[in-house]
Image (tube, rainbow, N blue to C red):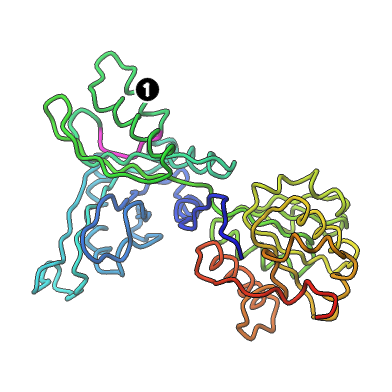
Amino acid sequence: MKSAPREVRLDTSLETLLEHSPGGATGVLATLVATAGSTYRKPGARMLIRQDGSFFGLLSGGCLEADLGIHANEVLQSRQPRALDYDLRGPDDTLFGIGAGCEGAMRILLEPLASGSPAATALADAREMTRSGRATALVMVHRSSRLPLGTYDAAALAAFASAASASAAAPRLLAAAQAAVAARESAQIDAEWDGERHRAFVQYLAPPPHLLICGAGPDAQPVASAALHLGWRVTLVDHRPAYADATRFPGATVLAGDARELAGRVALDTCHAAVVMSHHLPSDVSYLRALATDNAPDYVGLLGPAARRRRIALELGRGCDALLERLRGPVGMDIGAATPEAIALSIVSEIHACLAGRVAARASLMLTAKG
């Protein structure tokens, strides 16, 4: 399989956290903004600590969450963000009496999170931007007296930069966010402006994976569900009105139309992976022909047994040549799957591994008329 030129972000904890955000209720957003040594998560990881003490996500393997809950309650009471430092690199590791042995240090930013709060607005704007296929950046300020600590997007930083009393920090952090998007990489900021030290983590966010499922039959539902649960974008297409029903795929985009119109209905160059599983041979041939012609996406999976794949290859003829490096048939990792849910797990796992560059290219089992 060739290397994927389309940008993708596999850490979709931002999306999954927002799905579990407190809405109108009150909670605390905990963001890992700096690390040293060996740590469970890396900068940019987030967790939600709810008002009732429950939480969603992890920043450690469970070592620090109880202590974070205590500080989160204080943030809720004071409504003031704060940054905490944890250093477990000492030989005795007696900080909490847990013997974690993590050998790492972390700096964590805690800030109020509720509907309409600055953090909630910044996260929601970032999700909207990346779900539309565009990259963006978030800036987590964790040391400054000129700017309130917290999470900012470009719009919020621009507003601070335009204020009459603005310090040099806001425009320079805005420039750092823009530079992160241009360079396609995150950055740590530790600088002195206006005679004061400022520290921030600038997190570059590429779009999450976009999965195209060609065929919206019953066995497509667990595939879509697994991908959506990971925070991926999912689009389904089907020529059958009974299957092309958005209520069957909450959270996904569902399109009805002839398979021959695929390229005109879906921007294929925005898709990172496609799975062809309509169980209707003429439609599968049309889907594959469109995917071959457009040369996108970089992963194409085909569901079905060997005899069916040979028949499709004959139907495609020379048109299948453009799929040789991209197509996987049978689709999915061989995990001994028997149920629709297990098959969905094998499919989504293989796509994830390929997008992460963890699966080496393997010869397609489909694209030969003789095979």
Q: Which residue is most to the top?
A: 164
Q: In which quarter of the image is the N terminus?
A: bottom right
Q: On the picture, is 255 further left or further right than 234?
A: right
Q: Where is residue 101 in the image (x, y as percent from the top left)?
A: 19, 74
Q: Give residue 339's position: percent from left, percent from top.
A: 69, 81
How far across and down, in percent of the image, does residue 13 sit? 45, 56
The residue shown at (78%, 49%) is: 255
Determine which quarter of the picture holds residue 285: bottom right
Q: What amino acid type should be assigned to the residue bearing mark 1?
A: Ala
Q: In which quarter of the image is residue 334?
A: bottom right
The magenta span reads: 148-153
Q: What element carries label 1?
A: helix
Compared across the picture, whether 231 is left or right of 281 comes to: left
Q: In this view, does 365 lie above or below 132?
A: below
Q: Residue at x 30, y 39 (%)?
A: 150
- All told, the count of numbered labels is 1
Q: Give the residue pinned by disc 1.
A: 159
Residue in view at x 24 percent, y 16 percent: 165
In the figure, 254 relative to 138: above or below?
Answer: below
